[in-house]
Image: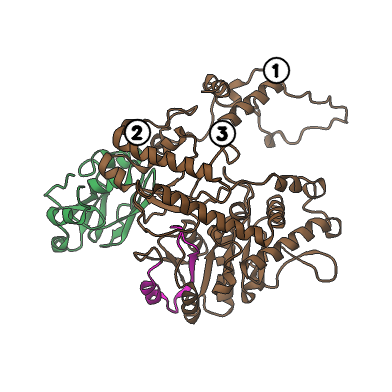
Amino acid sequence: MEIPGDRRYTTEHEWLRAEGAEAVIGITEYAQDELGDVVFVQLPSIGSRVSAGAAFGEIESVKTVSELFAPAGGEVIAVNEVLTEHPELVNDSPYDTGWMVRIRLDDPAAVNSLLDAGAYRTTLPPGS
Amino acid sequence: MNAAQQVGAEDFGARLSFDRSEPGRRAVDVPRFTGRETDLPDVRLLRDSLRLPEMSQPGLVRYYTALSLRNYGIDSGTYPLGSCTMKYNPKVNEAIASMPGLAEAHPLAPAEDVQGTLRTLFELQAALCAITGMAGVSLAPAAGAHGELAGILMVKRALDERGDLATRRRVLVPDSAHGTNPATAAMAGFTVTQIPSAPDGSMDHEVLYRELDETVAAVMVTEPNTLGLWERDIEQVAQHVHAAGAYLYGDGANLNAVLGRVRFGDLGFDVIHLNLHKSFSTPHGGGGPGAGPVLCAPGLAPYLPAPVVEEPDGAFVLTRPDRSIGQMQQFHGNVGVLLRAYAYIRALGLDGLRAVSEHAVLNANYLRALTRDHFDLPYGGPVLHEVVYSGIRQRREHGIRTYDIAKRLIDYGFHPPTVYFPLIVEEALMIEPTETESRESIEALAAALVAIAGEAASNPEALHDAPVSSPIGRLDETAAARHPVLRWTP
């Protein structure tokens, strides 16, 4: 299962890719596979604040609804509007076009405390 | 495919009665109007047209008959939905509820004209109190979640009257709960704290007792829980909840496992709801109507929703408890459903109800024993009324999801079970056979599950394509959820 090395992860299966003082957030390949076909993604509004470990939105698949947890705190500066019409991008391209929000990090250094790709892989069940 | 199914398949292009409409056709002749004509009301209040399907009577009957032949219900075969208690509904219930004196009673009739109906409801109240060991009851809530909401609103009112509502804002709910529990708490204005399950399937008491403080309004427990397991040491839990000044709510959805054997009142529950459409054999599926009576300990009885039936001096009357939370809906609840449950209880008696739980538990464990080598059982051990499997082995080894297994069961002639619930079990497959399935049907269901487990290994494509024998194949649920078409348009 693909776990890109250019970003950080949480045990809740979100990824965060830092770009200087900003970061892009989405869910992992494993998360989308566990959820099944995604039918709806509810994202925060631009300008709202997210805090590390707290829910920032909801994702609904054919079998369940889950909360989305922010890997780091900050102000939402962009959301992936395309997901409103095309939630399937989360399944098709979780690391790229299926991204969810872009935030301005409160503390860019805090990103270093998140899991790297290798550490995240060890949290997944064997064989995934 | 039999002839009946061919009718449905042949007409698949004409899915709605509107699609079969022909101008000028009528199913009945409307009598010619012979009264005095008056002017129309203000035309701005009128719709400019009302489209109705125009069909002949035989065309209409054939249309509905074709639809009914595509249906699958408990009268067609085994319907093993977990946590839904899809038991057979004895036809005597229908006969009783259809008696004209009961069926035709008007909700606004004066009490003295409907003494028979009120007496029946009064006796049902007494029977439900006796079965559950609770002191007070209102039959008014129309479904399980409605009863839950009534119960938590009663707790809220009681806390308000004792001056605790401002501080007690939390409701604790185990992670194995039905989704209606946290939804109820949230709808009543509380915040929800989730209590994780321990490895044995009961909620984690260490976490529960740590969370129990002066900010907690209630703890909501499903007993037995959605894993088909008894929540252990529930009396001790009740003591802790009461010592913390909170209320213990009981979700009675799984009463079928312990009917006639365990009483919620004896365990220390303060308020519970029952699902008459589950445990007491009134028809359900397809969204209703149900009945979700709320029952309570003496201290909460003044808050019960109106109406309740009382017999103050030889006559039955509908009353409103002193400090009632009000009415949960108009009139008196789903009386037709209540009558069916009453008929069921009177037909079985206490010995019969005990036999219900005995056979329900026996059937679930027999099914479990016949299938346990073929699926993972995350919580091991014997169960009560239902078995929760995990399809994780089929998924890891063969790429088969529980969803595929459920759809394949249709090809074997069974209604699919509950899937992906409880949420704490990966690839959950939840089966509640109920007491009304015979030994042969349990064995046939087990044989189908074992055969499907075999197909997962030998012929996984068959499972991906299932169902292949039903009038309609696998529906694209994803497209339906992403792009729902909610309204028919010509």
Identify the residue position indicated by label 1 in the image.
B24
3 or 1: mark nearer the eye? 3
Task: Give the image location of residue A102, x and y in percent.
Answer: 23, 51
Residue B110 highlighted magenta (yes or no): no
Q: Is residue A126 above or below residue B207?
A: above
Distance Cα–Cα, label 3 vs label 1: 30 Å
Q: Which three-letter amino acid code belongs to the residue tagged 1? A: Gly
Task: Using the rendered image of the protein, determine whether residue B416 is visible from the camera's viewpoint.
Answer: no
Q: Which three-letter amino acid code belongs to the residue tagged 2? A: His
Residue B227 highlighted magenta (yes or no): yes
Q: Residue at x 69, y 44 (%)?
A: B91
Identify the residue position indicated by label 3 in the image.
B71
Disc assigned to residue B464: 2
Return the disc, 2 or 3, that comes first in the chain's sequence. 3
Distance Cα–Cα, label 1 vs label 2: 46 Å
Q: Is residue B94 above or below residue B237?
A: above
Q: Does residue B23 appear to the left or right of A56 in the view shown?
A: right
Image quarter where the C terminus of chain B lies is top right
Other-residue count near label 2 (Cα within 10 Å), few / some / many at <14 / 14–19 / ≥20: some
Q: Badge 2 sits on which subunit? A: B
Task: Using the rendered image of the protein, determine whether residue B248 is visible from the camera's viewpoint.
Answer: yes
Q: Are marks 2 and 3 in contact (CB under 8 Å)?
A: no
Q: Residue at x 51, y 51 (%)?
A: B363
Q: Residue at x 74, y 62 (%)?
A: B123
Residue at disc 3, secondary structure:
loop
Query: In the rendered picture, chain A carries what hue?
Result: green
The magenta region covers B203-229
